[in-house]
Image (cartoon, helix red, strand yellow):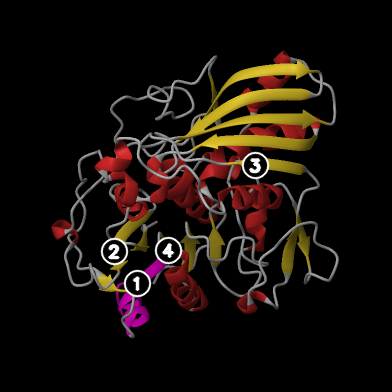
């Protein structure tokens, strides 16, 4: 089968360049178009500064299309685009993603514009893969990846919830500069430690998305009173055929920015419904894996979680679930940086587990996670037919 022609929405941003990197040698998707702002429109990819630490891979020297071009959809159809990866700010993503998704192009978004909207799956493939059944539930071929901070929390909590049940989650995060894009990563003052530590809205976003991905997928339109937590009411999705009933778990989340280029680390305390030993908890985390349909994806880590005694934020950034790399090349190795590293697992009592977890925020938490979602859709034959 020929690879699907894909467009990346985002020419010069950090996540956009991560996505281009992952498409350089992808077996299922081929980079056939790039859309950017007025600042980059009309430029060739080769002429745009490459700011990732890894060398620029060999990419097609495409001319960047303008996100404001009235003929954009027509131009994308001319090159047979069937899949779009959105790496845009939410304000720009809203109209553009809807336009593409309503035209039959499958949109996989790293943006926050439509997260938690009815009929738009918000999916982590090794946490809630069945939520992708709601793809096209609101008439749009659109699915979203979660906030990057959620990944190191949601994956271990999903495993614990499955085996023991969970009643309460407390989390404190230490988030990398790259979570704010190139704005801080390329700022020497920020690299020297002079930057805001508060991340506005991050804690609320992380908490509500956790309850969403742990929730139950339900058929039928949402009715008053049948939601358990905040959801996004967007007029485009008012006739959705399905929705999510959020999990009944208490959450207490606190987030801060630290002076580290990449990697989000979280410190969690999870209260279980059933008693467990440390050995049982470690076994639960070690064996956790996505369903068979997802295990064949190129971006699926060899193990969802890589267990260590104690996390080293320098040495443990790039894990494929089994091995750590100190010279990764994500354009060649799609599994690098896709595992969640878990360490310092302690049982403070038989129903309370404490741990730390760590993941690459621009790989697993952004471009890699979004691409993995598209790969799941590919294996489950949810993508549009190629021309």
Where residue 364 appears, as percent x and y from the top left, is 46, 41
Residue that mark 2 sits on: 32
Tell me the residue at 81%/47% (across/down).
Answer: 248
Assess whether mark 2 and mark 1 are in contact (beta carbons under 8 angstroms): yes
Say which label, 3 or 2, has the lower sequence index: 2
Label 1 and label 2: CA atoms lie apart by: 9 Å
Q: Is 81 within the magenta?
A: yes
Say which label, 3 or 1, has the lower sequence index: 1
Q: In this image, 123 relative to 192: left or right?
A: right
Q: In this image, 210 relative to 71: left or right?
A: right
Residue that mark 3 sits on: 253
Residue that mark 1 sits on: 80
Residue 226 lies in what quarter of the image? Answer: bottom right
Q: Give the range drawn in magenta.
A: 71-85
Label 3 and label 1: CA atoms lie apart by: 43 Å
User: Which numbered circle lies on residue 89?
Assistant: 4
Q: Is disc 4 placed on a helix, strand or loop?
A: loop
Determine if residue 330 is in view. no
Q: Is 102 within the magenta?
A: no
Crowd tier of the residue under label 1, counting other residues whose Cα lies within 10 Å: few below 14, some 14–19, many 20 or above? some
């Amino acid at each position: 089968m020929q690879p699907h022609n894909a467009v990346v929405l985002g020419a010069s941003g950090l996540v956009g360049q991560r996505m281009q990197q992952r498409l350089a040698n992808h077996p299922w998707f081929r980079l056939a178009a790039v859309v950017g702002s007025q600042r980059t429109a009309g430029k060739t990819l080769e002429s745009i500064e490459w700011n990732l630490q890894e060398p620029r891979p060999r990419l097609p020297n495409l001319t960047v299309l303008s996100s404001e071009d009235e003929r954009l959809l027509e131009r994308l159809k001319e090159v047979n685009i069937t899949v779009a990866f959105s790496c845009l700010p939410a304000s720009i993503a809203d109209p553009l993603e809807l336009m593409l998704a309503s035209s039959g192009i499958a949109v996989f978004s790293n943006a926050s514009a439509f997260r938690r909207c009815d009929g738009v799956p918000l999916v982590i493939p090794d946490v809630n893969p069945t939520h992708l059944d709601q793809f096209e539930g609101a008439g749009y071929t659109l699915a979203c990846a979660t906030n990057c901070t959620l990944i190191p929390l949601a994956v271990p909590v999903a495993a614990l919830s499955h085996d023991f049940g969970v009643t309460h989650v407390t989390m404190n995060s230490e988030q990398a500069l790259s979570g704010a894009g190139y704005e801080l990563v390329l700022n020497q003052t920020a690299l020297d430690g002079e930057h805001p530590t508060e991340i506005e809205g991050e804690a609320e976003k992380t908490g509500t998305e956790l309850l969403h991905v742990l929730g139950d997928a339900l058929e039928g339109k949402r009715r008053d009173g049948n939601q358990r937590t905040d959801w996004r009411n967007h007029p485009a999705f008012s006739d959705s055929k399905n929705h999510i009933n959020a999990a009944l778990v208490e959450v207490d989340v606190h987030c801060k920015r630290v002076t580290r280029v990449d990697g989000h680390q979280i410190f969690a305390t999870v209260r279980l419904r059933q008693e467990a030993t440390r050995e049982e908890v470690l076994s639960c985390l070690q064996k956790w894996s996505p369903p068979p349909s997802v295990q064949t994806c190129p971006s699926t880590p060899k193990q969802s979680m890589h267990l260590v005694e104690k996390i080293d934020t320098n040495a443990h950034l790039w894990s494929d679930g089994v091995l750590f790399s100190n010279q990764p090349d994500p354009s060649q190795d799609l599994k690098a940086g896709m595992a969640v590293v878990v360490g310092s697992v302690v049982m403070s009592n038989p129903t309370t587990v404490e741990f730390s977890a760590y993941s690459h925020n621009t790989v697993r938490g952004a471009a890699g996670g979004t691409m993995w979602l598209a790969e799941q859709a590919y294996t489950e034959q949810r993508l549009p037919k190629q021309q």
